[in-house]
Image: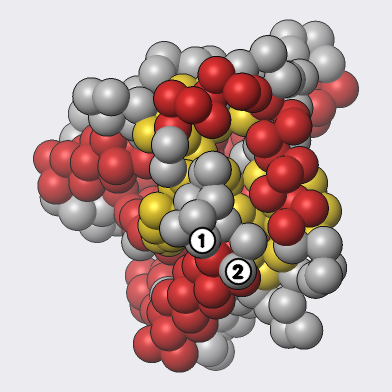
Amino acid sequence: MATTTAKAFADFLTKLEPTSTDQAVISGRSTSVSGYLKTTFDADSDMPLVSTSVIGSGAKGTGIRPVEDVDILAVFGNAQDVYNKYAGDSKQFLYRVKNALDGYRVEVVGARGQAVRLFYTSGPHADIAPVLPVTGGGYYLPAGDGSWVFTNPAQDLTWLNERNAALNHQVKPMVKLAKAWNRTHSRRFRSFHLEVMVASAFTTLGANHRQALKVWFAYQNITVAAPTGGQALDGYMPYGSTRRTAAINLLNSSAERATNALAAEDRGDHAEAIRLWQIILGSDFPAFG
């Protein structure tokens, strides 16, 4: 509980931060995935496993509690030969990886079927992105329609870290707040899309996250592209679609509530401000008291 809105936000951000135990579990998922895959894709395989590493929120420091899934990049060798074999249908490459894990509980997931989810007895689960390295950097990732997409998690991480440093190290806390908001309201936005929306929205950013959230809700920069590769990130919510309309309506209602919360805080009514922020950010947001 908190008696001021600023204290409620500080406590909430602390609550969202993954613990050392969470970090150990995240690292452990990469290790276990590597072990499972190496049983099939060993050094004698025509596509040996080269490495696994944590990517996504776990690598960027933008994840929030509870940690629900861990994104893992699985890099395979003999890239040119493997690509030539599966160039016409990347789904065969993806399902070859899936089939290697069929002794466990797995399914294909992702925006277009780009990852293999490996379920554990207790969360978080692992979303494995199998890729082939590209000369000069980056990877080819299978797409659900049989084509390939380019991805470069290392450059995405560099871009986000540069934006965070340029904006007083406030981008990542803002991303975490945005993810808590998104989780509370039906997960209208995908995680990476949300990260880029937040990191692209500001030219200056301070530690007043209440004011910054109000600005971001009102800004509504839904149409953004990946920092590397240039792919539009809002393709899953086309213009005029029910999903995009619902997302815009959510941003509008959140902007209105945030405006009212800031007004309540300005007049010293922290109980009302905190009540409104709890509607925006969810029941885990500290209550007044």
Which of the 4 image quarters holds residue 23? Answer: bottom left
Between 228 and 44, which is closer to the camera in this rendering? 44
> In this view of the protein, can residue 71 be seen by the observer?
no
- In the rendered view, does 119 fall on the left or right side of 148? right
Amino acid, disc 2: Thr
Quarter of the C terminus within the rendering: bottom right
The answer for how far apart the CA atoms under marks 1 and 2 are is 6 Å
The reply to whether callout 1 and callout 2 are in contact (CB within 8 Å) is yes
Give the x, y percent position of residue 31: 47, 75
Give the x, y percent position of residue 108: 78, 46
Give the x, y percent position of residue 252: 65, 31
Color encoding of the figure? secondary structure
Task: Determine the secondary structure under disc 2.
Answer: loop
Between 268 and 238, which is closer to the camera in this rendering? 238
Residue 219, above or below 181: above
Amino acid, disc 1: Asp
Task: Determine the secondary structure under disc 1.
Answer: loop
Q: How many marks?
A: 2
**Residue holding disc 2:** 39
> In this view of the protein, can residue 154 be seen by the observer?
yes
Q: Kindly identify the residue that appears in the image at 38 percent across and 34 percent down.
A: 133
Give the x, y percent position of residue 107: 82, 53
Q: Residues within 10 Å of mark 2 (few under 14, many from 20)?
A: few
Q: Kindly identify the residue that appears in the image at 52 percent across and 44 percent down.
A: 47
Which mark, by number, is residue 42?
1
Between 275 and 123, which is closer to the camera in this rendering? 123
Q: Residues within 10 Å of mark 1 (few under 14, many from 20)?
A: some
Residue 111, above or below 272: above
